[in-house]
Amino acid sequence: FYGWIVVGVTVLALLVAAGARSAPGVFLLPMEQTLGFSRSTLSLAVSLGLLVFVLAAPLSGHLMDRLGPRRVAVAGLLVLALSLALSTLARSALSLDLTWGLLSGLGTGLVGSVLGAAVATRWFVRQRGLVTGLFGAATSAGQLLFIPLLTGWAQTIGWTGGALVIAGTALVLVPLVGWLLRDSPAELGLQPDGDRVSAEASARVAPPPDPLVMRRALRHRDFWLLAATFFVCGATSNGLVGTHFIAYCGDRGLTPGFAAGMLALMGVFNFIGTLASGYFTDRADPRFLLELYYAFRGVSLALLPFVPPGYSLIAFAVLFGLDYIATVPPTIALTADTFGRANVGTVYGWIFCAHQVGAALASWLGGVSRDALGSYNAAMIAAAILAGAAAVLALGVTVPARRAQPAQ
């Protein structure tokens, strides 16, 4: 089935996008030393990149629904390569904001936010969850792979050399993506999952995207439930744990190296958990999976303040890692089943935007809570309550007709 070639190319693009998103955190100190900019100046550029990455998700989804994933992925890789290459020439705060910030956020947003969801829903139905889990695992693997590579490059060829390596890798992928990636099975006379039909029949199976889908989605209760639960996902994972876990361990008397090891362990089990989640999404009601994931996450966060510092945290790292982004496959599946797979790019783009807004708010409020109260315990308990609320909300999503009554 040619769809697996499309999956392979998409995985490569997601790996590069994940590496580019990991670069600011690794290159922050080397850039401070070589450019002479203050930490706040560099952080502003990174923050602008994250903001544009959030806003690029709905744009990317809309463009993929209208123009197809191939053109958007090629454009995103070109913008990403251009941003990294130009950032090595930046000698002012403004030029750094434009290259390391705005252009980088746009490039990674076009490639790394909605591409996997669009490809999985266009090419697969029976194995959609598994493929979505594979794409989520590729993102985790990209971060795990590139962080040590970027660290080594920063020490040997400098941050500019590392940025040029990623830019060159993105450029190498451009012709490969343009050649091998196809927008839909209909181009090859196929249905999703490789069923062979005529091109005319395939066109009927895959209707064009609805230009007014967001007007319909905004009036649909399920859109707001999915956006709200994904908001909680971002707040409790990337926002609180992803941003503050190392600082939390420092408050408990643990070294940054130990905390980084725990985060790496989370990443390994995140890879496993996301693949498993995709597998189960194809075989179970996604609503019940979301309820289980959020409830499990809430219990983990509620117990974290009571876990003794030290190697006892390994249990938390393993359990929380399994659940870190396991919510992605069932969320995408419910989006596709409710609003149509031709509209996933647009609708999921906005749901993903809610995820990133939750991450940004929790990242900020977690620090505010720590400064005001002297510990992260209140933030952890609040996040646990939010996760419990998300578990309840997930059950309110309507059972999609495709799952309630399997198609003939």
Image: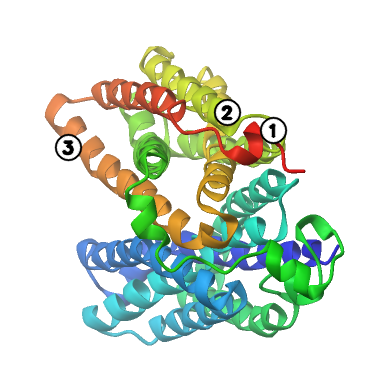
Residue under pointer 2? 289
Q: Which amino acid, mark 3?
A: Val
Taking the spot 34% from the left edge, 64% from the top edge, the residue there is: 55
Q: Quadrant of the C terminus?
A: top right
Q: Which amino acid, mark 2?
A: Leu
Taking the spot 15% from the left edge, 25% from the top edge, the residue there is: 373
Above or below residue 210? Residue 181 is below
Closer to us: mark 1 or mark 3?
1
Q: Which numbered disc, 2 or 1, marks the residue that appears first in the sequence?
A: 1
Percent position (x, y) of residue 233?
42, 38
Residue under pointer 1? 280
Could you say which is closer to the camera, residue 43 or residue 340?
Answer: 340
Q: Which numbered disc, 1 or 3, marks the residue that appears first in the sequence?
A: 1
Percent position (x, y) of residue 376?
27, 26
Q: Quadrant of the N terminus?
A: bottom right
Could you say which is closer to the camera, residue 65 or residue 247?
Answer: 65
Left or right placement of residue 133 versus residue 52 in this view: right
- Asked if the residue at tag 1 contacts the one at tag 2, i.e. Cβ–Cβ closer than 8 Å, the answer is yes
Residue under pointer 3? 368
Q: Quadrant of residue 207?
A: bottom right
Q: Which amino acid, mark 1?
A: Phe
